[in-house]
C-alpha cells in the first residue's frame, strides 16, 4: 500500500450525457465517479457528453471524489477525440474500456503523454474480454501511469456466453486472474457492477464476496448502491479493533517471532495485514472527514 493510497470503495458510473446525474453526483457520497462516454451514451449524444464530462472534470466541483472519464474504446470513431479532450481536462484518471494487451496500455500511456495529460491523470484499464483475461498479467505491469484495473463483468459475461448468477461461478476464474495481476503489479483493482438496482440483498452479497476476494471496491450504476459499498469495502469497527489488539499483542511480545491474539497464532505476516487494515481505515476516515 503506497502513501498516496486513495480509497475506491464505491466507484459510480454515470452517463455524461445526463445533466441531472452530473449535478446530483456533487452530493453523492461515493469515493469515485466514472463519467461515461461509452456504453451509457447514445452515438448522437457522444460529442455533447464529451464536452460535459470534460467541463465537469475540470470544474473542481466534485470535492474529495476521484473524478474519471471513461472514453470510447480503441478503434472506435470517438476514441481519439475523447482521449485528447480528456487529457486536456485533466481528470484523476482516464478509464479505457476493453483494453486487451500490454502494447495497448503502453500506446494509451504514450497517447496521454502526447496529448499533454498532467501527471496526476492516471490510466485505468477495463478488463472485460477473454483476450484481456489471458493478457492481464503483462497488461497490469505495462506502464507507471496505469493505476487501476476495472472489471467489466457485463461484457465478460456476454463474451463468455455465460449467465449472471448469484455467486458468479462462471466468471470467478477471471476475477481471480484480474486480482492476481493487479496485486502482482501493485495497483488497485475494482469489481464489476451489479445490474439489479432494486435487489439490495443480492447487491450486499456481491459486495461481501468482492471484499473477501480482495477487491479495493466496486463499480456501481446507481446512487442507492453507494452506502452499502462504502460499508462493505471499509474495515468494520470490529476488524479495526481486532487489528489494534493484534498489533498491541505483537508489540508486547517484542522480539518473539510468534505470539497469540484471541487464541490465534500471530506471525509477522499477520501484523503486516493488521497494519494494512488500520491504514485503510485511516485513509477512509480521512476521506470521510473531507465530506
Ligand atoms: C440504471 C439507471 C438507468 C436507473 O435510472 P433511474 O430509473 O432514473 O433511477 P432512479 O429514478 O432511481 O434515480 C434516482 C435519482 O438518482 C439519479 N441517478 C440515477 N442513476 C445515477 C447515477 N448513475 N449517477 C448519478 N445519479 C444517478 C437520477 O437522476 C435520479 O435523480 P433525481 O431525479 O434528482 O432524484 C441509472 O441509474 C443509470 O443510468 N445508471 C448508470 C448507467 C451506466 O452508467 N451504465 C454504464 C456503465 S455499466 C458498464 O458498462 C460496466 C462495464 O463496462 C461492464 O461491461 O460491465
Ligand atoms: Mg463493458
Image: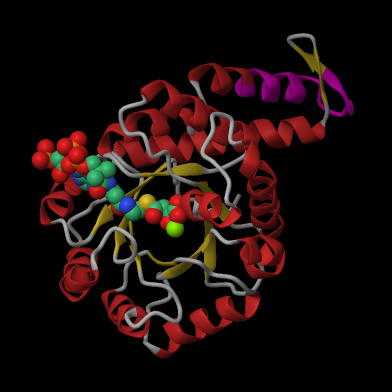
- Percent position (x, y) of residue 181? 69, 57
Q: Residue at x 16, y 67 (%)?
A: 52
- Percent position (x, y) of residue 263? 79, 9
Q: Residue furthest front?
A: 161
Q: Is residue 129 magenta?
A: no
Q: Using the image, determine if residue 130 lies above or below residue 29.
A: below
Q: Relative to the observer, which residue lies in front, 263 or 55?
A: 55
Q: Relative to the observer, which residue lies in front, 19 or 216?
A: 19
- Side of 267 where 91 appears, left or right: left
Task: Give the magenta range.
Answer: 243-259
- Percent position (x, y) of residue 118? 38, 78
Q: Residue at x 37, y 87 (%)?
A: 115
Q: Residue furthest top?
A: 263
Q: Relative to the observer, which residue lies in front, 141 or 165?
A: 165
Residue 244 appears in the rendering? yes
Q: How many marks?
A: 0
Q: Residue at x 44, y 46 (%)?
A: 8
Q: Is residue 248 magenta?
A: yes
Query: Residue 144, located in which quarter of the rendered image?
Result: bottom right
- Side of 15 where 127 appears, left or right: right
Q: Using the image, determine if residue 246 lies above or below residue 170.
A: above
Query: Residue 44, located in which quarter of the rendered image?
Result: bottom left
- Side of 224 where 26 appears, left or right: left
Query: Residue 226, located in which quarter of the rendered image?
Result: top left
Q: Residue at x 31, y 73 (%)?
A: 90
Amino acid at each position: 500500500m503506497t502513501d498516496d493510497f486513495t480509497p475506491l470503495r464505491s466507484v459510480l458510473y454515470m452517463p455524461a450525457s445526463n445533466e441531472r446525474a452530473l449535478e446530483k453526483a456533487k452530493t453523492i457520497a461515493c469515493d469515485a465517479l466514472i463519467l461515461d462516454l461509452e456504453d451509457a451514451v447514445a452515438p448522437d449524444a457522444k460529442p455533447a457528453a464529451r464536452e460535459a464530462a470534460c467541463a465537469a472534470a475540470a470544474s473542481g466541483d466534485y470535492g474529495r471524489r476521484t473524478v474519471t472519464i471513461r472514453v470510447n474504446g480503441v478503434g472506435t470513431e470517438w476514441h481519439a477525440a475523447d482521449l485528447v479532450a480528456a487529457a486536456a481536462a485533466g481528470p484523476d484518471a482516464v478509464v479505457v474500456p476493453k483494453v486487451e494487451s500490454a502494447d495497448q496500455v503502453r500506446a494509451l500511456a504514450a497517447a496521454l503523454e502526447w496529448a499533454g495529460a498532467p501527471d496526476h491523470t492516471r490510466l485505468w484499464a477495463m478488463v472485460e474480454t477473454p483476450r484481456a483475461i489471458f493478457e492481464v498479467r503483462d497488461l497490469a505491469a505495462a506502464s507507471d501511469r496505469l493505476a487501476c484495473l476495472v472489471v467489466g463483468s457485463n461484457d465478460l459475461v456476454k463474451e463468455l456466453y455465460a449467465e449472471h448468477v448469484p455467486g458468479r461461478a462462471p466468471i470467478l476464474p477471471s476475477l481471480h486472474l484480474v486480482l492476481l495481476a493487479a496485486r502482482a503489479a501493485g495497483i488497485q483493482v475494482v469489481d464489476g457492477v451489479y445490474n439489479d438496482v432494486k435487489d439490495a440483498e443480492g447487491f450486499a452479497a456481491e459486495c461481501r464476496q468482492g471484499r473477501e476476494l480482495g477487491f479495493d471496491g466496486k463499480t456501481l450504476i446507481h446512487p442507492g448502491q453507494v452506502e452499502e459499498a462504502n460499508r462493505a469495502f471499509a474495515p468494520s469497527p470490529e476488524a479495526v479493533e481486532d487489528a489494534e489488539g493484534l498489533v498491541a499483542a505483537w508489540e508486547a511480545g517484542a522480539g518473539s517471532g510468534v505470539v497469540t491474539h484471541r487464541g490465534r497464532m500471530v506471525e509477522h505476516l499477520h501484523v503486516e495485514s493488521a497494519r494494512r487494515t488500520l491504514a485503510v481505515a485511516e485513509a477512509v476516515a480521512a476521506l470521510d472527514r473531507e465530506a
